Image (tube, grey):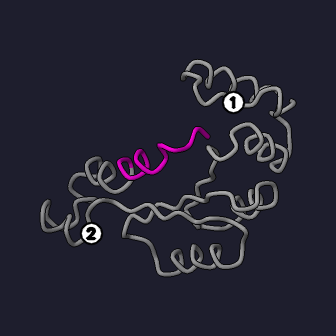
Amino acid sequence: MNAAEDRYDLRADADELRRLAEKAGRELEDAPALEILRWAAGTFGPRFCVTSSMEDAVVAHLASRVAPGVDVVFLDTGYHFPETIGTRDAVAAVMDVNVITLTPRQTVAEQDAEYGPRLHDRDPDLCCALRKVRPLEEGLRGYDA
């Protein structure tokens, strides 16, 4: 696939984006990760990012090899282990990436004050909407892929 020929038009609608993804899926089905990332970065340019839970840094590392300075989006729910935050900080310090940390509108303490403690146990759907879905929807608006 030639990324220059298939460069994504930022004015394209959801159907055009779906067709582009289906075509790439067929053509890149058995491709190595670097080739897929190269296609995505070449096709979407600055509207491409990778997300990472910082469980590991493999995708961030690979993306930095094909798109130095690529945005790596991390969702900090407020419930991460210190080691996870340490991995995020290490990735930002040693890789050629731009780590963007998304956070919910409320801290865990503010959420507890409004909804009561341990919302994740009592109403996991609401907790995920507040701490994951909304921040990701807002934070990923500037990206197409």
The front one of 73 and 44 is: 44
Disc 1 designates what residue?
8
The residue located at (49%, 47%) in the rendering is: 140
x, y percentage for residue 101? 48, 65
Q: Residues within 10 Å of mark 2 (few under 14, many from 20)?
A: some
x, y percentage for residue 14? 54, 23
Quadrant location of residue 22?
A: top right
x, y percentage for residue 32? 85, 46
The residue located at (65%, 47%) in the rendering is: 46
* The N terminus - image quarter: top right
Disc 2 designates what residue?
108
Quadrant location of residue 2?
A: top right
The residue located at (22%, 65%) in the rendering is: 118
Q: Which residues are magenta?
A: 133-145
Say whether residue 112 is left or right of residue 39.
Answer: left
The front one of 53 and 119 is: 53
Answer whether residue 136 is magenta in the image: yes
